Image (cartoon, rainbow, N blue to C red):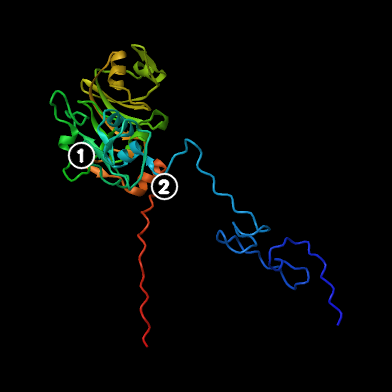
Amino acid sequence: MARKPPSPPSDSRPSGRRPAAATDRKGPPRPAKGPGKPGGKPGGKPGGKPGGRPARTPAPTPAEGASPDGDRIAKVMARAGVASRRDAEKMIAEGRVRVNGKPIASPALNVTARDKVEVDGKAISAPEPARLWLYHKPSGLVTTTRDEQGRRTIFDALPEDLPRVMTVGRLDLNSEGLLLLTNDGGIKRRLELPSTGWLRRYRVRVKGAPKDEDFAALREGITLDGETFQPMQVTLDRQQGANAWATVGLREGKNREIRRAMEAVGLSVNRLIRISYGPFQLGQLKAGEVEEVRPKIMRDQLGLEAETPPPAKPVRRVRKPRNS
């Protein structure tokens, strides 16, 4: 019997297998198999015989200087209600912060939930959802955590069931009215930035009988002792005996700004009440009372996204044996 002539050479690579897509095969070509384990059979497996597919290129490592997982430690401390980011950085510089038992000297460090962060030897609590409160500060309280002169602070007067909070800005000793409180250092910083541009409105009582034109300089903006005050919105409301009431609006919060500006035009302030801070109003809140802002309203006004709850822990499901 005559020997069968050899088949013509194939233009596919010698892999020891049928080609992935033969021309005489009906239907769509069969997809090629991916690489297998090193040292496997030839044909697309790394470490196999010549003719296989090249090994996959390993994923590139992060660029030098890229941030690792987690958040900056100052941000974590602020979210835990320890302090604002700026104050947290000061605590770190003072050597008061430890991470996993070791003191740190720089805030350029990212931490995750697996890390143990301690401030003054005490572990900080897990970050809580951001919250915001309206507080009607009475006159005669200092807006600070501790007063060197021993005067009573707002923290001495706040309800005991209130969590640890920080003030957004401050009101001086003799000023009263709306003061925002938050447990989130990021929100505190955001609301205090001049770039926020929120209007802060005050009811101001001055001694005397001023005329509307007396406030013209304040509406244009003035400079006192080298410090420039932005133009204010001033409305003369009414005369009440020896005093007059005015409504003043400004978009910055420099120290004793309204009192100093009024003195510059010859008027003395004897009562000052903040009635609004951006979209948040004092309303009918009585002196010393605290009212929490609803989370949705807070998020809408601040442009925050709803916080997603942490992922649930995986539950191991055990398959029940079948009844025989």
Describe residue 54's horizontal placement relative to residue 210 as left or right: right
Question: The disc labelled 2 sits on which kind of residue?
Answer: Glu
Identify the element where label 2 is drawn: loop
| Residue 183 % position (x, y) | 28, 41
- Image quadrant where residue 38 sits: bottom right
Please state if 151 lies on the left or on the right of 323 as rendered. left
* Residue nearest the viewer, comparing 20 with 46: 46
Please tell me which residue is depicted at 35% across the width and 60% down the height of the picture. 313
**Distance Cα–Cα, label 2 vs label 1:** 31 Å
Q: What residue do we see at 27% from left, 16% from top?
A: 267
Residue 107 in view (yes/no): yes
Q: Amino acid at mark 1?
A: Lys
Q: Nearer the viewer, residue 249 or 110?
A: 110
| Quarter of the view holding residue 43 | bottom right
User: In the shown orientation, is residue 4 left or right of residue 31?
Assistant: right
Q: Is residue 109 above or below residue 142?
A: below
Marker disc for residue 286: 1
Q: Earlier in the sequence, mark 2 or mark 1?
A: 1
> Quick one: SS at disc 1?
loop
- Position of residue 292 measured from the top left corner of the image (x, y, whole percent): 27, 45
Q: Residue furthest left?
A: 150
Residue under label 2: 305
The image shows residue 295, relative to residue 207, as above or below, that is below
